[in-house]
Amino acid sequence: MDKNKIKNKLKDDPAFTLEVQNPEVEELMAQYSSDKKAETLNKLIEKCTKSRFLVPANVGENNKPIPLFIKNGEGEAFMPIYTSKAQLSKDHPSPCIVNMPFLAVNNMVANKESKLDGIAFNPFTHNLIFKKPLVKRLRQWKKARREGHPTSPTKGKTVQMTAEQYVIFERMQYEHIFLPAKMFEGGKEFMDRLADEKEKLIDELYEEAYQQKRMYPYMEEDFSVMSMQISDTLNVTRVDFPTRDMAPNCAIRAYLVWDDAASQGRYFVIDAKGDKTTELAEITEDYKRLGYGAAPVEGAELQTVLDLVKKSAEEQN
């Protein structure tokens, strides 16, 4: 095959061509910027997961493209992606342009080693931002979809959420993904800050995680935080979540455990179940959920958590 034929073949291949067009994505971005509705965001996310975008990049070793990033006035760094060539900056051309599936971009930004704060769509026009908490949740959605998890978008369909469903959805994401991620990433520094700022920090982080800021329904008074120094090296912080907006699989409270000696954290939750019972579970650093069966009575929860931590330590030694 001659070079021209190869060039034409690559041009027509959706994985290589720069002739990318995403009119439906652009329409949904404009609509979401206007109405700020959860239903619109849901449709936009669903469309993005099936789309490819143009990503500016530098050329690294062995001609490997390295995606560029941009910063806002607060110093936050974002990976810019573009819906078409027309959206690319003509004043600041980049060394090369890469055609990437959205999910590949999302995974790069969601990676815990990534220092990026999110994804910026068409920063010179729409300038729609998906911040890191949402990016991480999208990765979990994709994983949940593969596993048929009931909280993920159903196969081939767009989930339409009411305002009430959206509040429950954000709650479950915060309690089971965002907050444990903050602990695992921040380590002792985060635990010390939590012990100092208590309800104020939990409330601020919850609002930060909300994609729909105007729908955030809570105040500091809705939370209760108690930090306990169990030993010279072991700290446990109990976080009680709001009693309203409770639904099956929401957490009633969490126990954040930090072992100074091992520089290791554990995150436990008491989850509400549909039959008015509760379950003790653990969220691991890679977001796996480990169920430990029916939760003990509230007064025995802490001791049960400590027993699990002690058992794991003994098994490792």
Image (cartoon, rainbow, N blue to C red):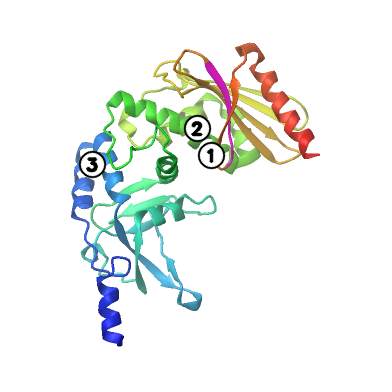
Q: Where is mark 2, residue-wise?
A: 176
> Is residue 112 in sight in this rendering?
yes
Query: Residue placed at 51% from the left, 14% from the top?
Result: 277
Q: Where is mark 1, residue-wise?
A: 287
> Is residue 229 in sight in this rendering?
no
Query: Residue placed at 33% from the left, 41% from the top?
Result: 155
Q: Amino acid at mark 3?
A: Tyr
Q: Using residue 312 as the reference point, say whether residue 149 is left or right of it.
A: left
Label 3 to label 1: alpha-carbon separation: 29 Å
Q: Position of residue 306 (x, y in %)?
A: 71, 24
The foreground one among 146 and 38 is 146
Q: What segment is highlighted magenta in the picture?
A: 278-285
Q: Where is mark 3, residue-wise?
A: 32
Label 1 to label 2: alpha-carbon separation: 8 Å
Q: Amino acid at mark 2?
A: His
Q: Position of residue 146 (x, y in %)?
A: 42, 44
Badge 3 or badge 2: first in the primary sequence: 3
Among all residues in the image, which is located at the extreme right? 317
